[in-house]
Image: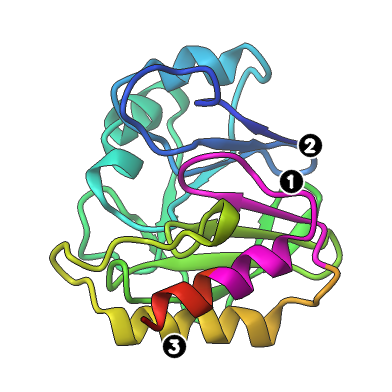
Amino acid sequence: MIRNLARRTDAFTSNVFLVTGDRRVLVDVGNEFDVVSAAREHVDDIDAVVLTHTHYDHVENLPAVVEAFDVDVWGYDTTQDGTDHAIEDGDTVRLGDHEYTALHTPGHKNDHLCLFSAAASVLFAGDLVFANGSFGRTDLEEGDRDQLVESIDRVLETVPEDLAAMHTGHGPSVEDRPYHDIELAWQAARF
């Protein structure tokens, strides 16, 4: 099961997804809300944290999560504070009951990852793309619009057109034709 722990939070934060099953994992940890209490409403412990990228709104709660759960943190770049283990492009990582393939997708930030499971038909898109064809900012440090377009193109080549769900770093998850939202983001980002 995948739950967005930040869904009803008024704070400026990223979404925080608790993936339960064989391996209980937080995908991102958010900012400015008590994610530890939110997680403990559903589970007693977590097995890992996986980061889509290290912008502050996705990682500010990391010290509290690591302290509360004594958990290792996985991400693309281990030179970033708090990231214990590297996930390379093409690596697989278990979230809940499924294996997800890591796609290095820079453009919003150099260490950005998307995570895709063919078996679950789920994409964790981070801040690469959002619902309704929106896409991640490229005006921040490490942002690069051309790279972002290439990354969206790579995701379109990887995920099937009948993708069941896309969980994004901000805003609502997309469970009705998410591939179409990715296509719209690719078109919008090109101009």
Please give the name of the residue rendered at 53% of the width and 44% of the height, measured from the top-left corner. Answer: 48
Quadrant in which the N terminus is drawn = top right
Nearer to us in this view, 47 or 51: 51
Give the mark toward the camera: 1 or 3: 3
Label of residue 96 in the image:
1
Nearer to us in this view, 115 or 84: 115
Residue range corresponding to the magenta coloring: 163-184
What residue is shown with label 3? Answer: 150
Q: Residue 132, how many percent across, how many down?
A: 58, 55
**Mark 2 residue type:** Met
**Mark 3 residue type:** Glu
Q: How many marks?
A: 3
Task: Name the element at disc 1.
Answer: loop
As drawn, which residue projects farthest toward the left? 141
Label of residue 149 in the image:
none
What residue is shown with label 2? Answer: 1
**Mark 1 residue type:** Gly
Label 3 crowd bin: few (<14), some (14–19), many (20+), radius 10 Å: some
Alpha carbon separation for disc pair 2 and 3 = 31 Å
